[in-house]
Image (cartoon, rainbow, N blue to C red):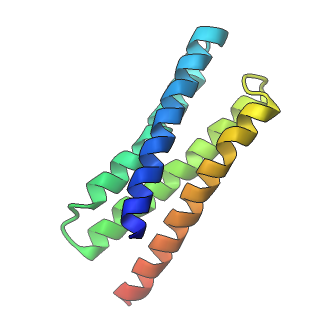
Amino acid sequence: MKKDLLREKSFAFALRIIKLSQYLQTEHKEYILSKQIIRSGTSIGALIREAQYAQSKADFLHKLTIALKEANETEYWLLLLKESGYLNDKMLQSIQPEIDELLKLLISSTKKIKENLK
């Protein structure tokens, strides 16, 4: 159940990140940070999908752990975009709950997998 929720949430988040990147490039002519956030923000879902066909539980954990790192990096880019003036408070507040939820789901999932591997 959580795996499907992660898939759905990460895919929806990736779509928001694509739109955000388009906004940054179109409205602000900002290409460096927009490429960074699109890379990390879309790789979360890609890694979750890749984990579906992991070769082992350890491989599954490894892929989800990398997805967690990418989610954390994406949150960093969002905060940097806000503090540098590319995003206003309203924009950040609209996307922040989504990255927070992904982080919580990934932390919970990786903890449970680690417990099961002991």
Picture layout, residue 27 above or below residue 76: above
Q: Quadrant of the C terminus?
A: bottom left
Picture layout, residue 24 above or below residue 100: above
- The residue under the point 47% across, 51% down is 9
Relative image position of residue 18 (x, y in whole percent) = 48, 28
- 78 left or right of 64 in image: right
- 13 left or right of 47 in image: right
- The residue under the point 53% across, 50% down is 71
Question: Is residue 44 at least partly visible in the picture?
Answer: no
Relative image position of residue 64 (x, y in whole percent) = 40, 62
Picture layout, residue 40 above or below residue 25: below
Q: In which quarter of the image is the N terminus?
A: bottom left
- The residue under the point 70% across, 30% down is 81
- The residue under the point 61% across, 15% down is 30
- 24 left or right of 106 in image: right
Relative image position of residue 92 (x, y in whole percent) = 72, 37
Relative image position of residue 105 (x, y in whole percent) = 52, 65
Question: Is residue 92 at least partly visible in the picture?
Answer: yes
Picture layout, residue 46 above or below residue 25: below
The image quarter in which residue 32 lies: top right
69 and 8: which is toward the camera: 8
